[in-house]
Amino acid sequence: MEKKFMPSINLYPKKDAPADMGDPAAWAERCSALGCDRLYVRDMSETDEGHAEVLDEIRRLCSHVAVPVVGGGAIHRMEDVKKLLYAGCLQVVLDFSVPQQAALLEEVSLKFGRDKIFVGVDSPADLSQAREAIRTYAAEVFLFHGAGVKEAALLSPLPVTAFLPEVSLDKLIEVLSFSNVGGLSGALINDNIENLGAIKQLCRENGIPVRQQQAAYAWEDFKKGPDGLVPVIVQDVKTDAVLMLAYMNQEAYERTVESGRMYYFSRSRQSLWLKGESSGHFQYVHQLKADCDQDTILAKVTQVGSACHTGAYSCFFNEIQNRSEKQNSHNPLRVFEEVSSVIEDRKRHPKEGSYTNYLFDKGLDKILKKLGEEATEIVIAAKNPNPNEVKYEIADFLYHMMVLMAQRGISWEEITEELAKR
């Protein structure tokens, strides 16, 4: 069993956040780039308003990392578990020291699958009492306090992730050598995140299996150009749009494979280049492929923000020739995004006589009224024999829905992410 290293962070509503707390998403990005295996985020909110604010932060954090996120904290009902999963968390932690959360285990496990559930316990004694429920309804166990980790590992029917305080490297190796310890979290990992690569190397030297990003092809396997570089075509994994063309040298290739973020070699600057380092528009790797001649790499990525330095979504926007009468028929999501971008532009730059600006000027109530009317029109059209009427009414409804999305600051990317989780 590969041992996993999981930094943890407590998330607060802005008014309750510690004064020295930086940007959680930036910190999570850093942990992800340094080779952590997953992240634990804990909602520390105490009100419904604060809970909604923290969920937004979790959603933002999840979109910025290339590793799974585990969520926990303010869980009072099954709806809270659903919201964490829909925010982007791969799994959730039910804390058995909180009766409300312990009571949810069976229902949540049956609803979302046991693979989504961690059970958190404070001690081996607590683990022993809940052993059968854990075996039946959960995937892993959190031991929130490091004391008793050996006993917990022997008692647990499932892998145990232990929250450890600062300990010596010898103690760390000893804990990880227990066969049923699945990983470590807590202060030990947070305080040593910059040295995580060295810790993993120490584990390997002691025969402890840890996750290591590897590639099927070494740099030597590629055919390089006269300059020693390999071109990389970058494609958005969600829309299939071609975003940019760049180049890699050996260091860029190896860092990309290891970190999960796209690195390139800048031919103009003659230096290594982490995409997004200055703009924040990082590219997270989903898949790397070589072509038939192994002289070109295709990278499928999650693009944060825009790919082009001009601010455009893609670098390929200067049309040379278009011999197709059908625009974007191959990619419905791009059609939605382009219509949405026009609506967003109207919002930022009002145009006299624009119906879209009329709706924005009238405000949310007018937009909602029109949306309701268009929904009713779909129902009426569906009762008629001509299916084209349904098509036209659905298009009208989608337009008004996109106006609402622009009004409330919601993107198609967020909508498709939500649908993909269901």
Image: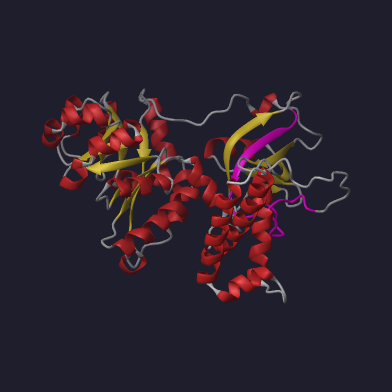
The residue depicted at 19 percent of the width and 30 percent of the height is: 133
**Magenta stretch: dominant SS?**
loop
In the rendered view of the protein, which quadrant contains the C terminus?
Answer: top left
Q: State the image coordinates of residue 14 (x, y, percent, origin top left).
A: 36, 66
The front one of 41 and 192 is 41
Boundaries of the magenta span: 295-317
The residue depicted at 36 percent of the width and 45 percent of the height is: 82
- The answer to whether 174 is drawn above or below residue 30 in the figure is above
The residue depicted at 13 percent of the width and 37 percent of the height is: 126
Count the numbered circles shown: 0
The residue depicted at 50 percent of the width and 70 percent of the height is: 365
The front one of 198 and 296 is 296
On the picture, is 17 further left or further right than 25? left
Q: Is 306 in the magenta?
A: yes
Q: State the image coordinates of residue 75 (x, y, percent, origin top left).
A: 27, 50
The front one of 357 and 136 is 357
- The answer to whether 261 is drawn above or below residue 61 in the figure is above
Q: State the image coordinates of residue 140 (x, y, percent, origin top left).
A: 29, 32
On the picture, is 311 further left or further right than 3? right
The color scheme shown is: secondary structure
The front one of 404 and 4 is 404
In the rendered view of the protein, which quadrant contains the N terminus?
Answer: top left
Q: Is 130 in the magenta?
A: no
Q: State the image coordinates of residue 175 (x, y, percent, origin top left).
A: 25, 31
Q: Is residue 24 visible?
A: yes
On the picture, is 409 further left or further right than 394? left
Q: Is residue 12 visible?
A: no
